[in-house]
Image (cartoon, rainbow, N blue to C red):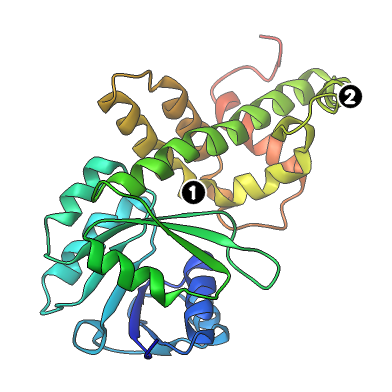
Amino acid sequence: MNATTIGLLHPGRMGAAMGRELVGNGHRVLWQPDGRSAATAERAGKAGLEQAGDLASACDVIISLCPPANAEQVAEGVAATAFGGVFVEANAISPARARRIGGLADRVVDGCVIGSPPSAGNVARLYLSGPERDVATVAALFAGTAVEASVIEGGIGQASALKMAYGSYTKATGALAAVSHALAATYGVGDELLTEARKITGHQLAAPGNLPGVAARAWRWAPEMDEVAATLADAGLPSELAEGAAAVFRRWDEDRDDFELALPETLAHLRAAGLSDRSTDPAR
């Protein structure tokens, strides 16, 4: 297909990786550096993204990949410009919020990304829903890359619903495993718990080495679980687990993007917030 100019808001770990795939597919990918960190600039540069002052006038497509709490603010900022291309709302937000964003402009595509950042050894899945022509346009941008694009029928909100359904399990299980290991460590039965957990197949409980990565990403996952809770409530389903998972993740706010954190520290930080106003006796 012909080269397309794409704006990316903003190149975090996932966004930069997807931008790299688009650049490798012959497209031009721009990003707006105002207010962004040096780490963001470094990621964008390594991915081959170009800095631009005005995405709205230069781009045919703008993709929003940001923390869920900022999704509407980012969308409103784009809607306030003269941008007339396709806006891809690809954040982990509830279907209701996706539909609100869909009402801000004529050409909005609802998207969700599942999996780790795409690379030579990993395929990420991008699900898209919305106007048929615009969905097809976005899907074609990723043809032949490590981003596998699929279309979901039913309009804006469907891709977000999939993300909420998927995230309600994958994110919550991380919270459950962390709480289990933290409790076992408090009472000195961590080895015994791990022995039992390893008899279970396919569960995060058997892989505590993954938990520091959970803590490092928790600042993004807490808002996502808020969205899951809202989606469950809208469907008449219990939202307490999602709310509880969000509360667990917020205990790791200070560990944001610290991928070097050790497991004992990860579990200690999870306990510390709950013990700050209590006796240090773990059995109390």
Residue 254, above or below 206:
below
At x 29%, y 19%, the residue is 236
Q: Amino acid at mark 1?
A: Trp
Image position, residue 88 (x, y; %): 30, 65
Residue 66, above or below 160:
below
Circles 2 and 1 in contact, beta carbons < 8 Å: no
Quick one: SS at disc 2? helix
* 216 with respect to 8 (left or right): right
* 92 with respect to 26 (left or right): left
Q: Using a 10 Å C-alpha cutoff, classify the residue at mark 1 as few (fewer than 14 neighbours), some (14 to 19) or many (20 or more).
A: many
Toward the viewer: 149 or 83? 149
Residue carrying label 1: 219
Can the viewer see residue 211 in this picture? yes
Toward the viewer: 239 or 131? 131
At x 12%, y 60%, the residue is 104
Residue carrying label 2: 195
At x 57%, y 54%, the residue is 115
Q: Amino acid at mark 2?
A: Thr
Camera-nearest label, 2 or 1? 2
User: Residue 283, which numbered label?
Assistant: none
